[in-house]
Amino acid sequence: MKRRLIVTCLFALLLAAVVGADTSEYYPVRLNVVKIYAHADGYCVVYRKGLAGTANAYLPSKWFTAGGKAEIIRGTDPSYPYMVVFFKEGKPDHVKLYALASNTDITWGILDPSQAKDKFNGDDIKIEF
């Protein structure tokens, strides 16, 4: 009888924890990255859009500060590179870019300094699907 009471109490606590759990205000979307181009003003990230297309996201270097809109995480995981865009109230809020640690990898490139200079001036993250 005691076991049954203990199991019932534990189940009730577990159920209360699940029901009372807070939901996040952020909705993450994972995007597969094809190539990351370094630029003096930030990063141009080429990612997959739809089944066969690609799109560019321009992430200014000023976003890569503590508490900024972007964070780059370097590593050697086989799933790299990819990008997670966090949406808040239906709009992109901030980005985490997971990139391979070695800049000599084929997924890294250098963007010509004269190209896309005005693309890094915005304060919003523009994502196409």
Image (cartoon, rainbow, N blue to C red):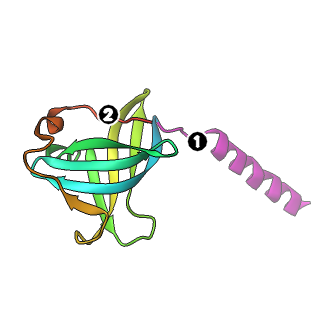
Q: Mark 2 or mark 1: which is in front? A: 2
The dot on residue 126 is 2
Q: Which residue is mark 1?
A: 21
Local crowd size for mark 2, using a 10 Å CA cut-off: few (<14), some (14–19), many (≥20): few
As measured in the structure, the alpha-carbon distance from the residue carrying label 2 to the one carrying label 1 is: 31 Å
Residue at 80% over, 58% down: 6
| Amino acid type indicated by mark 1 | Ala
Local crowd size for mark 1, using a 10 Å CA cut-off: few (<14), some (14–19), many (≥20): few
Q: Quadrant of the N terminus?
A: bottom right
Q: Quadrant of the C terminus?
A: top left
| Amino acid type indicated by mark 2 | Lys
Q: Position of residue 105 (x, y in %)?
A: 28, 70
Q: Position of residue 34 (x, y in %)?
A: 37, 56
Position above or below: 78 against 47? below
Q: Position of residue 102 (x, y in %)?
A: 26, 72
Q: Is residue 15 left or right of residue 118?
A: right
Residue at 84% over, 55% down: 5
SS at mark 2 in the image = loop
- Front residue (pair 48, 13): 48
- Front residue (pair 65, 110): 110
Dominant secondary structure of the magenta stretch?
helix
Q: Position of residue 93 (x, y in %)?
A: 34, 35
Q: Is residue 52 left or right of residue 57?
A: right
Residue 78 visible (yes or no):
yes
Q: Which residues are magenta?
A: 1-24
Residue at 75% over, 47% down: 12
